[in-house]
DNA sequence: CGTTTGCTTGAAGTAGGTCAATGTGAGTGG
DNA sequence: CCACTCACATTGACCTACTTCAAGCAAACG
């Protein structure tokens, strides 16, 4: 997966912009060892102190928060290629907990080294900022979904958002993808119960919007689904025209 | 409100860090005329093109999105001192619409000029990034509230978040504040109907958690309210230790 | 003053939650 | 290769937090 330069982060960011050797060097030097975790392992907990951010090499994870009485809200899903935690540089405590949804491999980087980026490579700072903004837009979509959509529409949203995300790194994905999360976890993402997630999934299947086979999901009428919830794909190319030159 | 340097943005950012004259100059030069709008006026619409960001001089506004069938979700509230729209630099189209909740005064700045900041003042870039991250944390809290909290808890969250925000710029605010939004707008923020917002507000009042008088709200048992929903104040001082020196 | 906008209140309906039981496939130990 | 377990999916019966609809009321406003 790491070709030549041997850094996850460099590979990830190179996808969006050309990096000169200086920037690459900066970043590559930050990388620490790889870490492997089982499924359902808490990598870090909310309101704990954590010095690293992570690039996902393989496997899915999610960030979540708990309410005092045990209710849980999953805030975001992380896929291979994602950078996790660089929104948390500002606070000394994590705002969410991080858990693996299946066996994963992560590359940790020390957060503090990020100031090097802001200091010496404004162009890279602008890129990080842009990635943050994209996540911001997705949160807005999520709030829209949770505030004003029915269970069926929310699940439709989750499917569309997930497949759009996967298409960044795999353009040939077609309409079938693997969704390695339990129905309880889907409920915790969308503010529903596992029971009702199940009933809604089956109703979507019966209405032939989707097909399911174990962890695999196929969207049978994606265009219609998009229209139903007025879906906007946030993963299309970013506007980098305003970036500094260097 | 603008003292000496005559720029809203400079004043706003100076609150968080010292700016040298170069940076101040950069920013001040960007400022265009002030604009005044009535209550319930749409300043810009989602998926339209918009070249400006705004600093709020006076009045409250909110960002929102609509669903095709007319359902509406209010995404964030903007208060005097807020910078609106600098998350939208990355996309060419606005992700949300902006509307005044009462008569307002805004200072527009051209978005494109932001690259000057990333280019020449990394420290300022880091500050903007930090403000973005704070908004990010608030969105996470919002998703947690919308996904897993009852109507009463959501309204409690809104009250606590609002008064915490107001305390940044007015430390002597006590436990009473003005909430210049209708109950329908509160519902559109929290994913509820105006009817149920009303019933919940009255129930909170009857239980003596809050007192209401027109637009004015008093929190009678703020500590208890905070504990009830495990509230975290995101507006306490930011960690600026990792910022670049210049 | 008449109109509009927002607040209040009650009655009736429903989307989704809760509780509880059963099914099922992957792993695991013997 | 079988029995046991455990985590998840599935299903049904019942319940409730919210919505919808509808009507009255009060303050602001042209």
Image (cartoon, coloured by chain):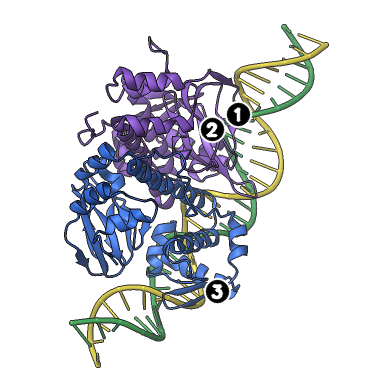
Chain colours: A purple, B blue, C yellow, D green
How far separated are the C-alphas under marks 3 and 1? 43 Å
Q: Is residue B209 above or below residue A203?
A: below
Please check whether the numbered discs 2 and 3 fall on a single chain: no
- Nearest the camera: B152 or C18? B152
Q: Between disc 1 and disc 2, whose residue precedes?
A: 1
* Disc 2 versus disc 3: nearer the observer: 2
Q: Position of residue A179 (x, y in %)?
A: 47, 27
Q: Residue at x 19, y 51 (%)?
A: B30
Query: From the viewer's perspective, is A35 left or right of B241?
Result: right
Residue B218, horizontal then vertical, whole percent: 51, 73
Do callouts 3 and 1 point to residues on the same chain? no
Q: Which mark is residue B205?
A: 3
Residue on which the image places disc 1: A40
Per the model, the C-alpha gap separating discs 2 and 3 is 44 Å
Q: Can you tell which of label 1 and label 2 is closer to the viewer?
A: 2
Asked if the residue at tag 2 contacts the one at tag 1, i.e. Cβ–Cβ closer than 8 Å, the answer is no
Q: Horizontal and vertical percent for residue D30? A: 18, 82
Chain of the residue displaying label 2: A
Local crowd size for mark 2, using a 10 Å CA cut-off: few (<14), some (14–19), many (≥20): some
Up/down of B226 relative to A25, above or below: below
Residue at position x 28%, y 34% in the image: A223
Q: To which quarter of the image does residue B220 belong?
A: bottom right
Q: Tell which subunit mark 3 falls on.
A: B
Circle 3 SS class: helix
Q: Are marks 1 and 2 on the same chain?
A: yes
Q: Residue furthest front?
A: B21
């Amino acid at each position: 997966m790491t070709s030549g330069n041997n850094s996850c982060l460099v590979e990830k960011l190179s996808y969006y912009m050309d990096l000169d050797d200086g920037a690459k060097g900066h970043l590559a030097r930050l990388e620490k060892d790889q870490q492997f975790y089982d499924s359902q392992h808490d990598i870090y907990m909310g309101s704990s102190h954590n010095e690293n951010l992570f690039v996902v090499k393989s496997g899915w994870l999610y960030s979540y928060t708990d309410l005092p009485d045990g209710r849980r809200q999953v805030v975001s899903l992380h896929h291979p290629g994602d950078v996790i935690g660089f929104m948390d540089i500002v606070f000394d405590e994590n705002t969410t907990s991080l858990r693996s949804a299946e066996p994963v491999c992560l590359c940790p980087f020390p957060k503090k080294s990020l100031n090097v980026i802001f200091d010496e490579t404004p162009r890279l700072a602008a890129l990080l900022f842009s990635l943050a903004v994209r996540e911001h837009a997705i949160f807005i979509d999520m709030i829209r979904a949770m505030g004003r959509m029915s269970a069926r529409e929310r699940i439709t949203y989750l499917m569309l958002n997930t497949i759009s995300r996967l298409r960044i790194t795999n353009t040939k994905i077609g309409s079938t993808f693997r969704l390695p999360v339990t129905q309880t976890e889907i409920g915790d993402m969308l503010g529903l119960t596992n029971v009702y997630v199940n009933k809604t999934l089956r109703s979507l299947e019966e209405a032939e919007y989707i097909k399911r086979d174990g962890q695999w999901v196929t969207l049978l009428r994606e265009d219609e689904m998009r229209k139903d919830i007025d879906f906007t794909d946030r993963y299309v190319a970013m506007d980098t025209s305003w970036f500094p030159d260097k």
